[in-house]
Amino acid sequence: MQTTLPYSWYADPEILRREQERIFRSAWQYVGHEGQLPEPGMYFAGHAGRTPVVVTRARDDVLRAFVNVCRHRGFPVAEGAGRRETIQCPYHAWTYGLDGSLRSAPRSDEEPGFPREELGLVPAAIGTWGPFLFVNTGPDPEPLDDALGSMPAQVAELGLDVDDLVFHSRWVADLDANWKIVCENFLECYHCQVAHPAFAEVIDTSSDAYALSTEGRLSSQRGPVRETARLDGPLRRSQFHFLWPNLGVNIFAGYPNISIGPMIPLSPERTHRFLDYFFGSSVEAGWIADLMEFDTQVGKEDRGLVEGVQRGLASGVLEHGVLMGRAEQLIGHFQQLTAGALAD
Ligand code: FES
Ligand SMILES: [Fe+2]
């Protein structure tokens, strides 16, 4: 029987350090959406994985991303979101344009040869898929389209037009579990019948109906809606995509909807999640409220599961668990990619 990753990997600071260096540092990360920067002169602060970033739309209307760390002595320059010509670091008031250039630094005229031109914010790559913004802080990133693989095509095939989506809300949670436990929980629906009765009533999660597939870094789950389900509407299948290392994308059957967000390690035993919900521009408020209520319930149930697993692993008695070869094949794939990236 296939075994899980060693349980020690789910609590070890050294493993997290290597994951940061070898996995997160060079991965495309979902950071937010275009609706956060509708006009020139706007910015917002966020995270690309564990790296603080600031995304800007300067007067020239170009989207840019930078590492949100002041070139002076490291304070985060931007906080929250805003509309202004420049961003000023709160520590010593170095001031940057939204194009990243250092505009002014108090008393720099007293410093002969102050290299102002060399002290702009460190740029990061930015890419878009519909309204979704992705940032990569690695040295030589692959094109975002390559990283997304067939996911945009699968979503389009379902009949969902991402360009017609309107942002609805962001759900945010910190979970007492290693980021890999949160990802692994996303990657199997073996627990759905047991742990998510309301979900399993709507989506057919039986092993014949619920399709699992992998393609490169993409793992997909497709569940048909049950005939009797209340999720009426033109989309007849749900799609749950996972893009290694840490992005979840959920589309429920019914009317156009999507939620997208990363699992970000805060520490070996703590994970930050956010999930941005979008709906088609003509979807009715009542249907949206129903889906939000339903998904909030699933989210609560999953919190209990992943935090329970973390407590179990941390007992330190068992060295690893086992995987169900068929029902948990996507976890096997996730673990293979993760272990491969960490191997010397
Ligand atoms: S750390 Fe930003 S101005 Fe000093
Ligand atoms: Fe779940």
Image (tube, grey):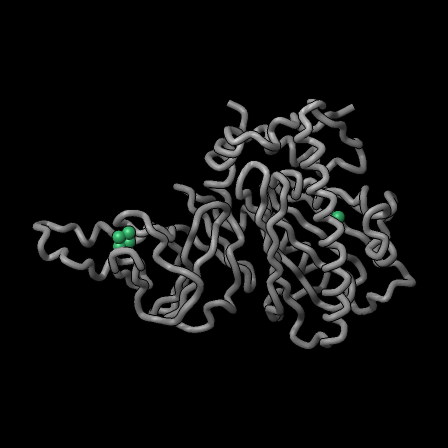
Residue at the image position 75 percent from the left and 35 percent from the top: 329
**Residue 188, position as x, y percentages in the image:** 75, 42
Q: Is residue 196 left or right of residue 60?
A: right
Classify 17 as above or below 64. above
Residue 120 seen by the camera: no
In the image, 225 versus 169, the foreground residue is 169
Residue at the image position 80 percent from the left and 38 percent from the top: 327
Q: Quadrant of residue 107?
A: bottom left
Quadrant in the picture for the N terminus:
top right
Furthest residue toward right:
228
Q: Is residue 90 left or right of residue 133?
A: left
Q: Is residue 8 left or right of residue 300?
A: left
**Residue 332, position as x, y percentages in the image:** 70, 33
Residue 258 seen by the camera: yes
In this rendering, the count of numbered labels is 0
Classify 154 as above or below 246. below
**Residue 283, position as x, y percentages in the image:** 71, 74
Q: Is residue 135 left or right of residue 335?
A: left
Residue at the image position 50 percent from the left and 66 percent from the top: 34
**Residue 32, position as x, y percentages in the image:** 52, 60
Residue at the image position 57 percent from the left and 49 percent from the top: 272
